[in-house]
Image: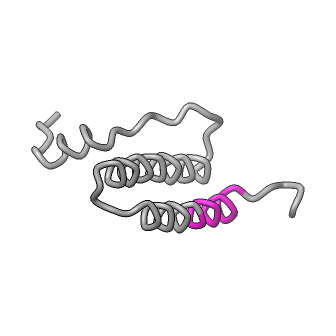
Amino acid sequence: MPDKSNKQQMDDFLMPRSTYQGEFTPEKLAFNANLQEFAQRVALICALETGGKVSSGEAYDDIKKMWKELKASKKSLLKNPEES
């Protein structure tokens, strides 16, 4: 297997991905990836706010926007069978 590039190694270090452990469907896998990205971005925004790089209001607004995007992702990917 070829060595990973420095950029890929840095990305893996800063934003590690966990393997999916649930019942597999492509939709569940995609939502899991979206959920992991949401969690990583929230952690980054919190660190920026704690470090004084962004305001509390700005951090809140960014996280709220990402939460709405995650909810839309869940709705489109993981349709509830009872709603069909």
Residue closer to the observer: 84 or 56: 56
Q: Residue farthest to the right?
A: 82
Horizontally, is 80 left or right of 68 in the view? right
Residue 84 screen position, x and y as percent:
86, 63
Q: Nearer the viewer, residue 25 or 79?
A: 79
Give x and y (percent) for residue 82. 89, 56
In this rendering, would 57 be left or right of 81? Answer: left
* Relative to 28, residue 53 above or below: below
- In magenta segment, residue 72: yes
Which residue is drawn at the image coordinates 50% and 68% (left, top)? 61
In the rendered structure, the answer to whether residue 66 lies left or right of residue 10 reads right
The residue located at (13%, 37%) in the rendering is 2
Q: Which is more toward the observer, 20 or 70?
A: 70
> In the picture provided, is 50 more to the left or to the right than 34?
left
Q: Could you tell me what secondary structure mostly forms the magenta stretch?
A: helix
What's the image's color scheme? one colour
For image coordinates 60% across by 66% down, the residue present is 68
- Whether 11 is drawn above or below 1: the answer is below
For residue 70, above or below residue 22:
below
Figure quadrant of residue 64: bottom right
**Residue 80 among magenta residues:** no
The span shown in magenta is 68-78
Residue at the spot 56% in from the left edge and 31% down from the top edge: 21
